[in-house]
Image (cartoon, rainbow, N blue to C red):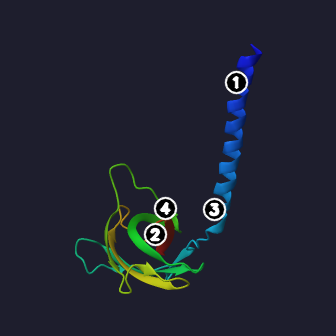
Amino acid sequence: MRRRDFVVAVPLATWAVACSQDDATDTSTSASSTTVTPTVTAAADPQPAAAVASTDSAFAWQASFRVTLAESAGASATVRTLTADLEQAAGGIVITPPTGLDESFRFVVRADAGNRVAASGSLPIEFDFFYSLPNLGREALVTIVLTLVDDESSTSTVTVSARVV
């Protein structure tokens, strides 16, 4: 029986040495690559945005504001998707409408500078929201989520809120 134990022990010892050598090689390879990941922040301006009577007869109110994306790590990123939600609010607090009622809105996006945030640069994006609220008020909270992709194809999201009064 000792002979079988020895035969099993030799392959296990060889496997353990081989695994430790592969791990050492992988560690040195990954440590040598340096990739700068973009750091992008977003700010809405003005804050709060003013609601005025809508020029679109399908909606009671409209508001315009700018979201500026700023990159601070020295790596560029591209805006791939953008979603927005508008919710009625009071004092900056979202007020959920009664069951069966919902906010209605549409928005227009103007990104005259394109969709790329340059390394250590900024990108302004203009928004026009047209909306009506179940409570017939004008105050709303707009939440915008942007999905970004960097030059290494890594994605990230940035969220910004704009208060409308």
Q: Residue 29 bears which disc, if any?
A: 3
Q: CA distance from mark 1 to mark 2?
A: 55 Å
Query: Dot 1 corresponds to which residue?
Result: 7
Q: Secondary structure at mark 4?
A: strand
The residue nearer to you, when weighing 51 against 80, is: 80
The residue nearer to you, when weighing 143 against 97, is: 143
Callout 4–callout 1 Cβ contact below 8 Å: no
Residue found 50% across the figure and 71% down from its top: 160
Quarter that holds the N terminus: top right
**Three-letter amino acid code at the position of disc 2:** Leu
Mark sitting earlier along the chain (2/4): 4
Q: Secondary structure at mark 1?
A: helix
**Three-letter amino acid code at the position of disc 1:** Val
Q: Nearer the viewer, mark 2 or mark 4?
A: 2
Q: Position of residue 52 (x, y in %)?
A: 36, 81
Which quarter of the figure has residue 84?
bottom left
Query: Dot 2 corresponds to which residue?
Result: 148
Mark sitting earlier along the chain (4/3): 3
